[in-house]
Amino acid sequence: MKIIFAGTPANAAATLQALLQGESGFVEVVAVLTRPDAPLGRKRVMTPSPVAQVAEAAGIPVIKTKRVDEPAVEALSDFGADLGVIVAYGALLRREALASTAKGWINIHYSLLPLWRGAAPVQNALLNGDKTTGVTVFQLDEGMDTGPVWLKVPAEVQPDENAGDLLRRLTALGISALWQVLPEIASGLRSPTPQVIGSQALAAKPTREAAKINFAQTAVQIENQVRAFNPEPVAFAFAKTTEQSIDSGEPFRILAARALGATDWASLGETVEHTLGLVSIQKNRVLVHCGQGTLLELKEVQPAGKKPMAASDWARGLQNEVIFN
């Protein structure tokens, strides 16, 4: 089966690598579609996407474009592929592009469709506090993740997973699902099942503004926010203190945190004024006061201009009271 692969980020590159190393022997990746090179790092060096790097190392023809326009469709059609496989390419494919392969295009989506259709299903699932998510392999149509489904594979969300952790696990699950589906598509022995699209929320890509922590929220809501926005855009707040060096107006990143329950609150053994955003050091734990009388334990933080560190190491050097806002 001749395949055109479309994708851009690291998880897509891992999927492409798995296709190239597959033991089945019936898959041949004849071309790759990806986004153009982008500036990375402090020096803004133009760098190929992770998918482009894998393809170029394997000697596979690469088409780099922001949108699949008429010239790109013509180029794709010239490869005579049987199927297109897309993972986080970064743009919708129109009807002409979908027709560039004999059997159309399939997509690996990191949710159980139709839940969390859109660009950021993993982040939105964590932000919503979902306990179950999964992977869906579906046939692309012109809608936003609305095509008929070939396979769904559920997965439990682990309590301490952030978006990066969960995406890596779902990527591996998606690769397994892809290998299950490809022979079925090649054989033509069955058809995908249509989705029932209702009023489910779309998985919009989180903005930097959404990553700003509001400590009037409960600790559980903030923990979900911290997990959902790591590794990007990373949840943050601003630290205020009598020390000018900390009251810098620069974002203080919170990389890992845990919401404490009522039992933890009662076990502190001290009466502490509950001021939203106030940092308390209790039994070598760094606690922040949140909405509805809850506490958030900071685990890993990154003060402005410094490397990530354990919250206890950051707190050890504090001389004055700190309040986040």
Image (tube, rainbow, N blue to C red):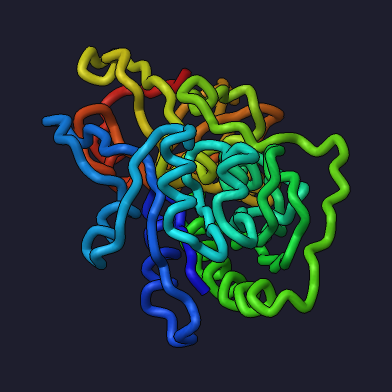
In the rendered view, does 215 fall on the left or right side of 238? right
Q: Nearer the viewer, residue 5 or 74?
A: 74
Residue at the left extreme of this rendering: 43
The image shows residue 228 at horizontal and vertical percentages of: 54, 43
Q: Which residue lies at the image location 38% right of the left edge and 55% below the top edge?
A: 32
Q: Quadrant of residue 152?
A: bottom right
Residue 226 seen:
yes
The image shows residue 314 at horizontal and vertical percentages of: 28, 39
Q: Is residue 207 above or below residue 121?
A: above
Q: Is residue 303 above or below residue 247?
A: below
Q: Which residue lies at the image location 56% right of the left edge and 56% below the top edge?
A: 101
The image shows residue 141 at horizontal and vertical percentages of: 70, 45
Q: Quadrant of residue 5?
A: bottom left
Q: Nearer the viewer, residue 123 or 98?
A: 98
In the rendered view, does 231 fall on the left or right side of 150? left
Q: Which residue lies at the image location 37% right of the left edge and 37% below the top edge?
A: 65
Residue 164 seen:
no
The image shows residue 74 at horizontal and vertical percentages of: 46, 43
Q: Which residue lies at the image location 43% right of the left edge and 28% below the top edge?
A: 236
The number of numbered badges drawn on the structure is 0
Q: Is residue 41 above or below residue 159?
A: above
In the rendered view, does 255 fall on the left or right side of 296? left
Q: Is residue 13 above or below residue 287?
A: below
Q: Quadrant of residue 269?
A: top right
